[in-house]
Amino acid sequence: QLQLEETGGGSVQAGGSLRLSCAASGRDFSSRAMGWFRQPPGKEREFVAAISRTGRIRSYADSVKGRFIISRDNAKNTVYLQMNTLEREDTAAYYCAARSSGEIGVTKDAYPDWGQGTQVTVSS
């Protein structure tokens, strides 16, 4: 099991940028695919982005494609989410998650390990 801790959330104006980080502790980070999900107020948790264990394969939700970039540094046991051109609709609690395998997944059920989340608020 991996322990995950997200940082980097905050308040930003529309059009701005934030970079989220997720530091992992435990075994086998480099062998596991990682994902970012978010939960807007009053809504279900939804997929944002995922990255394979090597970083070669990435997947994005349509709503963030072209604006968000997921990356990872296996030497630092950290995965990142660079969020650009933020919109009010991006306001949510953002969660980092780890799969048991190296292949990406796009559903919550594919990820057994989760962080506590970090809040992102975008104002107009």
Image (cartoon, helix red, strand yellow):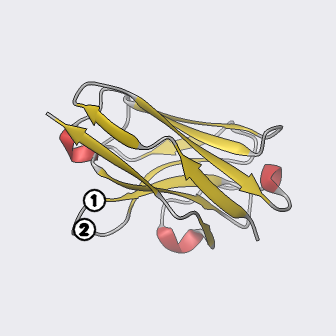
Q: Is residue 28 visible?
A: yes
Extreme front residue here? 10
In the picture, which quadrant includes the N terminus?
bottom right
The local crowd at label 1, few if under 14, some if 14 to 19, many if 20 or more residues have their Cα within 10 Å, is: some
Which of the two residues, 5 or 87, is positioned nearer the viewer here? Answer: 5
User: Measured along the vertical axis of the image, is residue 69 above or below residue 91?
Assistant: above
Q: Write down the quadrant of residue 11 in the picture.
A: top left
* Residue labelled with disc 1: 40
> Which residue is at a point 72% across and 54% down the rendered structure image?
24
User: Measured along the vertical axis of the image, is residue 93 above or below residue 49?
Assistant: below
> Which residue is at a point 81% across and 49% down the rendered structure image?
30
Instruction: Check disc 1 and give the amino acid type.
Output: Pro
**Residue 87, image x, y percentages:** 23, 36
**Residue 63, image x, y percentages:** 30, 43
The local crowd at label 2, few if under 14, some if 14 to 19, many if 20 or more residues have their Cα within 10 Å, is: few
User: Could you tell me which secondary element the residue under label 1 belongs to?
Assistant: loop
In the picture, which quadrant includes the C terminus?
top left
Q: Is residue 83 visible?
A: no
> Which residue is at a point 62% across and 56% down the rendered structure image?
5
Residue 115 is left or right of residue 25, and the answer is left
Which of the two residues, 10 or 68, is positioned nearer the viewer here? Answer: 10
**Residue 58, image x, y percentages:** 57, 41
Residue 52's label in the rendered image is none
Q: Write down the quadrant of residue 31 in the picture.
A: bottom right
User: Measured along the vertical axis of the image, is residue 21 above or below residue 38?
Assistant: above
Residue 43's label in the rendered image is 2
Mark 2 and mark 1 in contact? Answer it, CB < 8 Å.
yes
Instruction: Check disc 2 and give the amino acid type.
Output: Lys
> Which residue is at a point 66% across and 64% down the rendered structure image?
99
Residue 92 is left or right of residue 50, and the answer is left
